[in-house]
Image (cartoon, coloured by chain):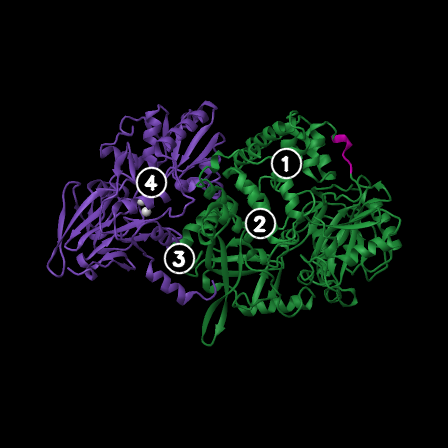
Chain colours: A green, B purple
Amino acid sequence: MIRLSRALERTKSSRGRLDKERALADAFALIGRDSLDEDSAGSLRVAVRLATGAVTASAPIGVGFSLMQEVIIAETGWDSEVVRACSRTCGDMAEAFGLLMQRVRGADRRSGVSLSDVARTFELLAQASSRAHKRRHLDELFHRATPLEAKYLAKVILGSLRTGALEGVVENAIARAFAQPLEEVRRAATLVTDPGELAVLARDGRLAEASMSIGAPVAFMLATPIETVATTLSPAQWTVEDKYDGVRAQLHLHDGEAIVFARGLERVTETFPEVARAAAERGRGRTFAIDGELLAVGEGDKPRPFMALQQRLGRKAPTAATLAATPVAFIAYDLLAIDGKILLEFPLADRRALLAELTDALDCPEIRLSPSTPLLDALDPLDPLETDALSEPTPELDVAEVARRLDGAFAAARGRGHEGLVLKRNDAPYEAGRRGQSWLKVKRAFATLDVVITAAEEGHGRRAGVLSDYTFAVWRDEGDARALVNVGKAYSGLTDVEIDDMTRRLTALTLGRYGGARLVRPEIVLEVAFDGLQRSKRHKSGFALRFPRIVRIRTDKTAEQADDVATVEKLFASQVGAGHREEGEAKTRGRGRRGMTEKGETTRQLGLFGEEK
Amino acid sequence: MSAREWAIEVRPEGLYLPAIELFLDPALPVARAFVSHAHGDHASGGAGEVFASPETLALIAARRGESSASTPAPIAWDGAVELKTPSGATARLSLAPAGHILGAAQLVIDHAGGRFVYGGDYRSGGDATHAIGAPVPCDELVLEATYGLPIFRFPSRDLLLTQIVAWCGERIDAGETPVLLAYALGKSQALAHACLAAGLPVRAHGAVRKMCAAYEALGVSLGVADGTLQHYASLDARAKKEPGVLLTPPWTANHPMIRKLKSARVALVSGHACIDAALDQRRADAGFALSDHADYDDLIATARATGARRVYVTHGEELGLFARLLGAAISAEVVPLVAAKLVESVTVAGEEA
Ligand SMILES: [Zn+2]
Ligand SMILES: [Zn+2]
């Protein structure tokens, strides 16, 4: 573990990606080549998994911030107020742990923990059912760890290790460590989703043997977001599907066992028992792997917004009442394998045809085929579902024309209660793990508002020390006067240079400090885009924006020219009309940022099964 | 003289001693002030009458030009100034080195009721560019706690300077350009001195060079006059590519000038460099926790060594917490000085923060 921790410490600076890869590669090579070590393959497997921030190959270990804090208090002797203050300052509890541990007498002279110790402890943590048990395993581990090991172990446990999240760094490091062609490593990586296994295959020169197997998840093929069509595409080669407002998932049936994998490839079978049961019962005797989306459905099979699905996320074994209140369907849109045959190299058109056959045979409301339409038809100004007429094949529409007609199709998808559209190339293979040009998602911002910054906070991680999080407000009439009422908070959208500049301006506008927040004189106007509105008591305006992001700083506008609540009300009304929101207030679970009901947090929440709240 | 008369007040302008009508490092213009050192956050207010060390007054003048309307009232290191209190008693003001930067002084006030010390920005120890800061025995102490958390523990200054010089040397040997991000006044001069002493060529950002020149005028030679320390922006394209250390303030870290420099390897030199997020923010390749402030252990040891029975603490994000920790570590009453006005305005305006 000490070799790996040192390598991770060397990779932490963000410049010099090559240095990062080299540091990791050196560590992997050393760990994997140690023939003296009885189980060098086992150690390599663990090291690579840890470097990508993965805790165990399968089950989550259920250790959250509060339990980790207890461990830090016990190990370092500082009280909770100190640990919290230090974590705040570092922007990372794990790093605070490492720094505080440097003060523990003798900690820097410890011999450290081995990778197999770590793996064993993580397995025990995953199995331990009580908090007290988990606590004991953690104490044993950290009591032997060096300060640097403690930092990186805690980062893995708390999910704040981001080295591996950097696209491709670990794959490149594996290729470099064992002198294998990068292309082969990448190809294998999409099929063998456990990076530890991938490294062992690379070490042993067996990458060619990598293949998908039903029952083990494959990295999802991803769509490239586009605001509108920018290049000429020939409509005959594309089909269009609605973009769903749910959770991306894979449904595998293997050896009679149905498994649901969520976006992060973690198992969520027990959260969606009706889907698993339907697959197992209706698919008896077959094997398959379907790619699709979990979606809450309402009356008349109408899709419900993501907010509704939220009631089902993060809950193992939902009660009958929950199942009845929020039924979920698996909307199938791609087929990766069927009856032992791997289809990844097949063109989409063929996979879709086989998928349609399969869903027909399954014939159940829990697993449905996602409707898809040839792009030519979708571009027809008529609703494609309303007409049987096949349009005249239009060989090459010019960009402007496609864009214009796509607007209509987009509006139609919104009208059906979906987020937007996905365009897919008929002849493309399933490019596992890639965000390529074969799938394009047209997902436009719902609207934009001009808002005024009323408060600012320091960000976390890379954005610690600068004011990168802004609370913003719109105007509300209050008798003769107008007052600013907050409507949301945005975390991103500006470049580092812009954030530095904003930090200077906001510091100058600071009226006072309240905890970590600075109240600022309301002068700076932002244009924020967002994907939807919901009623919320969190903000004084009575509304909250979904996925707010900063489009630009409106230097041309004064605070007085910002939007007002009446505008927000109008937008909300139009959105309810289209079925994107349900009236009534969103229930926010948990607290703080981790409890936010944003879709971006889904993976995190799913990954927190069994965690104490 | 009553103890009450020697109370310290937090006013919107800054810390205030009503007994002698003196503001300490005020942020706004006032009638009479003590300025502990020339950093902008301490010497920003300006005042009718400014008590400060001769070096501090010289550095302030160099920063701002000579246009300031203030009347400088230098206190010599071996001298003193006497001020009358309303009750007719006399208070004697003298200086003691505060470490920190060239000219940085602690204000020592001896009055009938005892000794009051305002530490300003403080660090125990010195280096080639400034005097050695050391605790001054007193009854009451104002202590600046920028690094008042136990995660802040800095290695020795000599070790850090050696490491920084070695890092710069390695980068140059590898054909890269070591860029040191450091505060233009104080830190940069310490770094320039160490690099020049090791024979490394040094180029400086304009602000850094200006302050180096001001140091040199005060007797700390930093190669400005003899041209050893070059002004980076004045170099032609070819000269910029020559091997050498680039010294520039942290705010330039994300500036295109540095981001475009392909060969640049950036190191943040600051007490905050022990935190990864600070390095990430500056996109630094390395960090060195070389600080001109006291670290946590130095703060505790300093407060203890003065023997003060009351310690006021200022600065720092977690002031209340530090006050509690310090109170538990030494036998003194510890009082956090929070800017009162700010808190008030927040409670009025704070609708939901
Ligand atoms: Zn200072
Ligand atoms: Zn200061």
The residue mark sitting in front, 3 or 1, is 1
Badge 3 crowding class, 10 Å Cα cut-off, few under 14, some 14 to 19, many 20 or more, is: some
In the displayed structure, does residue B352 sit left or right of residue B103? right
Task: Mark 2 and mark 4 in contact? Answer it, CB < 8 Å.
Answer: no
- The disc labelled 4 sits on which kind of residue? Asp
- The residue labelled by disc 1 is A116
Q: In the depicted view, which residue is nearer to us: A493 or A19?
A: A19
Q: Kindly tell me whether mark 4's CB lies below 8 Å from ligand 1.
A: yes
- Label 2 amino acid? Arg
In the rendered structure, which amino acid carries the disc numbered 3?
Thr
Q: Is residue A209 magenta?
A: yes
Pinpoint residue A421: horizontal percent, then vertical percent. 72, 54
Q: Say whether marks 3 and 1 touch (CB < 8 Å).
A: no
Say which residue label 4 marks: B292
Instruction: Indicate yes or no whether the magenta region holds residue B56.
Output: no
Which of the two discs, 3 and 2, labels the residue nearer the N terminus?
A: 2
Residue position for label 2: A135
Residue drawn 46% across and 62% down? A559
Could you give the CA–CA distance between mark 2 and mark 4, rounded to whole angstroms?
Answer: 40 Å
